[in-house]
């Protein structure tokens, strides 16, 4: 017999590793990716591929040359960050802007804090918001679904005249709301639900995101608390505003089906690293995200508020973790 | 179906030996009988070198309040009393007995008859249990008689027999339920009378449906005994979780089961109580599961205390060159053996042989704050926080976060996707914080 190993218990493991969790997230995003490719064609593939490749490259390069630590790309978290970043960008974005976004997401939002697990803010959202502020024009050119898919090598509109650009792009539903008020929007709920609207690559199809979300719930990667409280609170808050003045505010169904609401609630806000540890905390976090989103959409300067709302709530997570403790066994005597 | 509410995990059952009937394991050549095989103060030897002993003779006496008598499991001659390594990995005082024949103490009733009539009074029962050296056979080895001597002012309402056996692999309690159902029920009735309560529950997890059916049928003859089927979830066999599952009561932090009117006793120990009280048989043998994924013949043996584990391992058809870790007990809470030469003690519920492929821990990653440990903790603690506090030696923070409530069930570490050694840190923290609390009390 070889030497016996000695260790403390437990001696078995549930076999769900960081690695498998990340793979499950990638799998859960597959429906959204497929819808995106159908709607946006090669542009979507290009942005996603560049985003994932550069995210992984930056993580590898930073660990190897700056931190001089063993590489952490094997945990697939950089792939997930890259994929989520890509899904939060318009499919027409030039390649170098995507690379900059990946550098900010991995370099500044993640590795500066010490890598996976130590970051305060969701890396993909930091990357997206950085690009939104730095490249406002490119980041708000929204290719039209299906139309743009026919246009191969759709790269930042180089060499296209303005008429061609107009034919290929259009506002998002939230853009219409922000520009023209309630009268400017259409109530094409089925289109919004299926994914036939302008927007970031991965946010357009509510049904594809929900399929992924159900998969994650089934694999116990996420719990229902954040997505449900996020969407429900946004729905209720938007509903209250709508009831107050339906000629001024959009209806709640419009709000939850458009923009990044679904993607944000299911995939971005549920990021384990940057969300609270207890169920009560998760619900507060979700409610904060939902209300802030509607506040920004309705009263803020930007038509879309999901990214900002989640990042703001990320900053509150340490506080939420202090305030919301799990129910302790035997805290009080209960006689049945 | 009943279960506890907070946390818990679902490890694979791997009850490989569930179909293996209990086999009598032959007496060893030399029995190594540890003087410290129960929780509490070690027993004091009452034999000396060259003394002749019979099976069942008292060889060491538990004098302290929390201690237990120890009886010879073999007949033969005391060779020496010396230190010998045990399952804890430490050397403890041990009586070495050279085996000659198999001569039993005459007072033991060796017939196969089931003795149903309970003649003794409550106090006599407890005295008998104490005399026969019965301890908790689930693994913690707390002396059984101490549990049934209630502190003044406390009153018991329920007796709970723990037949949950929630640890993966182990089947010794399951086999006892199947093969000795009448004895377990009589033992339950004895303990119920000793405790003077109206209600006794026998909690069995639903993965032992044959045992549930058998015991439920037989329990129909006992007015005060009820068999409760429980939903499978680890750690349901933990005392506090079992009480919660069956009665809905929560033992308050830092208190004992009796504070909510409950006394819990393991089903194997209940069988031992039957043998002690009805057959006058001391606790000198127990059922041990010997199992593992690469074991050819997973078995349940009735083993004399003091038998070397190496003999058990040699009899189950296993390629030892493929074995990387050997565990005394189950894989969730059991202790790793440092050598196969350690003897079986009253607390040895199983020997689990893990092959080299499953015996190493995986590489540790950063905590990704997934909160799985928080969701898994059956005590409602925050293991990620406690292990970090412990690692950074922030003992006051650990104490405030209730580290002493930890029952060391291992759910947190089992579920951690970053393979962090959470329970290792928690154990260190509990030890340190415990010391600090004791020093403060002085």
Image (cartoon, helix red, strand yellow):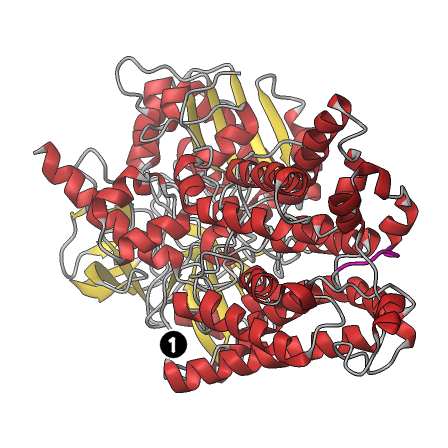
Q: Is residue A216 magenta?
A: no
Which residue: 33% across, 55% down? B388
Q: Residue at x 41, y 28 (%)?
A: A330
Where is residue B63 drawn, in percent x and y? 17, 37
Is B61 on the left-hand or right-hand side of B304? left
Q: Which of these two is toward me, A72 or A261?
A: A261
Name the one closer to the observer, A124 or A222: A124
- The image quadrant of residue A189 is top right
Determine the image quadrant of residue A65.
bottom left
Q: Quadrant of residue A235?
A: top right
Residue A241 horizontal/vertical position (percent): 71, 27
Secondary structure at numbered mark 1? loop
Q: Position of residue B50 (x, y in %)?
A: 16, 61
Q: Disc 1 designates what residue?
A: A4
Instruction: Residue A243: tell me if it is visible.
Output: yes
Q: Is residue A198 magenta?
A: yes
Which residue lies most toward the bottom here?
A65
Residue at the spot x=24%, y=51% of the render? B36
Residue B198 against residue B252 in the figure, above or below: above
Looking at the rendering, the stretch of residues picked out in magenta corresponds to: A195-199
Question: In the rendered view of the protein, which quadrant contains the N terminus of chain A?
Answer: bottom left
């Amino acid at each position: 017999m070889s030497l016996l190993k000695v260790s403390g218990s437990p001696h078995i493991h549930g076999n769900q590793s960081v690695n498998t969790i990340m793979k499950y997230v990638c799998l859960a995003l597959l429906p959204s990716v497929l819808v995106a490719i159908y709607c946006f064609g090669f542009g979507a593939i290009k942005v996603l591929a560049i985003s994932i490749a550069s995210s992984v490259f930056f993580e590898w390069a930073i660990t190897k040359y700056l931190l001089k630590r063993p590489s952490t790309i094997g945990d697939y978290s950089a792939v997930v960050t890259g994929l989520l970043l890509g899904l939060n960008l318009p499919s027409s974005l030039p390649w170098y802007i995507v690379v900059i976004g990946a550098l900010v997401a991995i370099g500044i939002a993640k590795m500066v804090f010490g890598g996976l697990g130590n970051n305060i803010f969701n890396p993909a959202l930091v990357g997206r918001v950085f690009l939104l502020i730095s490249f406002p024009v490119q980041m708000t050119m929204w290719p039209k679904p299906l139309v743009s898919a026919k246009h191969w090598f759709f790269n930042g509109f180089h060499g296209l005249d303005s008429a061609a650009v107009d034919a290929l792009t259009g506002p998002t539903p939230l853009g219409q709301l922000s520009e023209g008020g309630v009268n400017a929007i259409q109530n094409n709920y089925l289109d919004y639900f299926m994914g036939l609207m302008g927007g970031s690559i991965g946010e357009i199809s509510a049904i594809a995101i929900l399929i992924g979300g159900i998969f994650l719930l089934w694999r116990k990667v996420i719990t229902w608390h954040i997505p449900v409280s996020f969407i429900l609170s946004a729905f209720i808050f938007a509903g209250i505003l709508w009831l107050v003045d339906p000629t001024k505010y959009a209806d709640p169904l419009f709000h939850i089906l458009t923009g990044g609401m679904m993607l944000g609630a299911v995939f971005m806000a549920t990021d384990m690293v940057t969300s609270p540890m207890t169920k009560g905390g998760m619900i507060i976090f979700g409610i904060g995200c939902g209300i802030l989103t509607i506040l920004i959409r309705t009263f803020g300067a930007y038509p879309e508020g999901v990214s900002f709302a989640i990042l703001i709530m990320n900053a509150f997570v340490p506080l939420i973790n202090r305030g919301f403790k799990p129910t302790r066994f035997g805290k009080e005597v209960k006689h049945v | 179906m009943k279960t506890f509410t907070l946390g818990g995990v679902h490890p694979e059952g791997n009850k490989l030996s569930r179909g293996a009937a209990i086999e009598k394991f032959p007496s060893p050549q030399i029995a190594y009988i540890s003087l410290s095989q129960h929780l509490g103060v070690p027993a004091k030897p009452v034999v000396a070198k060259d003394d002749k002993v019979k099976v069942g003779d008292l060889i060491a006496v538990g004098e302290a309040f929390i201690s237990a008598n120890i009886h010879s499991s073999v007949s033969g001659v005391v060779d020496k009393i010396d230190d010998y390594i045990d399952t804890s990995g430490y050397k403890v005082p041990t009586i070495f007995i050279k085996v000659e024949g198999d001569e039993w103490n005459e007072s033991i009733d060796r017939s196969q008859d089931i003795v149903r009539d309970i003649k003794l009074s409550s106090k006599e029962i407890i005295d008998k249990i104490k005399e026969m050296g019965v301890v908790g056979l689930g693994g913690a080895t707390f002396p059984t008689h101490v549990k049934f001597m209630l502190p003044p002012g406390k009153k018991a309402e329920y007796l709970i027999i723990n037949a949950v056996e929630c640890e993966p692999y182990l089947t010794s309690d399951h086999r006892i339920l199947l093969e000795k159902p009448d004895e377990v029920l009589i033992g339950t009735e004895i303990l119920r009378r000793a405790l003077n309560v109206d209600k006794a529950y026998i909690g069995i997890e639903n993965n032992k449906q044959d045992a549930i059916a058998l015991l439920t049928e037989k329990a129909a003859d006992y007015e005060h005994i009820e068999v409760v089927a429980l939903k499978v979830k680890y750690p349901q066999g933990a005392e506090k979780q079992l009480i919660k599952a069956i009665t809905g009561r929560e033992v308050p932090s830092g208190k004992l089961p009796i504070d909510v009117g409950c006394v819990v006793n393991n089903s194997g120990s209940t069988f031992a109580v039957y043998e002690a009280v009805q057959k006058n048989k001391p606790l000198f043998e127990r059922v041990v599961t010997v199992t593992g994924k690469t074991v050819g013949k997973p078995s349940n043996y009735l083993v004399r205390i003091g038998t070397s584990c190496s003999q058990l391992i040699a009899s189950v058809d296993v390629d030892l060159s493929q074995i990387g870790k050997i565990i005394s007990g189950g894989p969730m809470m059991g202790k790793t053996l440092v050598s196969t030469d350690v003897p079986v003690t009253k607390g040895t519920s199983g020997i689990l042989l893990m092959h080299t492929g499953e015996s190493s821990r995986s590489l540790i990653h950063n905590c990704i704050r997934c909160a799985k440990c928080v969701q898994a903790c059956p005590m409602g603690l925050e293991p990620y926080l406690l292990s970090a506090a412990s690692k950074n030696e922030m003992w006051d923070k650990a104490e405030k976060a209730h580290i002493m409530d930890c029952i060391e069930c291992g759910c947190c570490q089992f579920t951690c996707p970053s393979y962090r050694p959470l329970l290792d840190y928690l154990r260190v923290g509990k030890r340190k914080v415990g010391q600090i609390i004791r020093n403060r009390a002085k």
